Image (tube, rainbow, N blue to C red):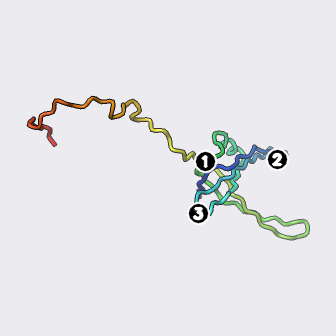
Amino acid sequence: MEVQGKIKLIGETKTFGNNGFRKREVVVTTEEQYPQHLMVEFVQDKTDLLNNFQVGQPVKIGINLRGREWVSPQGETKYFNSIQGWRIENLQAEQPTGGQNVPPPDNFEPANNLNEEDYDDLPF
């Protein structure tokens, strides 16, 4: 599954427990009629994927939906969902690399020596 939108917030990497579990959250605002602010968590080595991104940047995030069951000490069962990211792509338009050295059309001299009677010998 994927989600697209603009980055609203990028959290700091947090470490939990004795095993050093790492988690980092990003909030993405979807661009639709009713925008949604979706919190996506990246865990362990995937937290580093967010290092090259900034607030306001349009992105596409590959996600997995996660769910778990928890039973309280009083015996009450609760369910929790999370959105876990595993890939993130920049959607900003890249600057074109080809054709940068071509001058604008008005920098060319007009051809004044055209003769309507010259034979067009092009094969197509």
Q: Which residue occupies the extreme bottom position in the image?
A: 76
Q: Could you say which is closer to the camera, residue 97 or residue 22?
A: 97
The residue under the point 57% across, 46% down is 89
| 10 with respect to 14 (left or right) | left
The residue that label 3 is drawn on is 33
Q: Position of residue 55 (x, y in %)?
A: 66, 45
Among numbered discs 2 and 3, the one appearing first in the sequence:
2
As drawn, 4 above or below 34: above
Image quadrant containing the N terminus? bottom right
Q: Could you say which is closer to the camera, residue 49 or residue 77?
A: 49
Q: CA distance from mark 2 to mark 3?
A: 38 Å
Image quarter of residue 74: bottom right
Say what amino acid the circle numbered 1 marks: Ile
- Kindly identify which numbered label has been placed on residue 16: 2
The residue under the point 58% across, 60% down is 32
Q: Position of residue 9 (x, y in %)?
A: 70, 48
Mark toward the viewer: 2 or 1? 1
Query: Answer yes or no: do the residues labelled 2 and 1 have beta carbons within 8 Å?
Result: no
Q: CA distance from mark 2 to mark 1?
A: 23 Å
Q: Could you say which is closer to the camera, residue 83 or residue 108?
A: 108
Image quarter of residue 81: bottom right
- Kindly identify which numbered label has been placed on residue 88: 1
| 115 with respect to 33 (left or right) | left
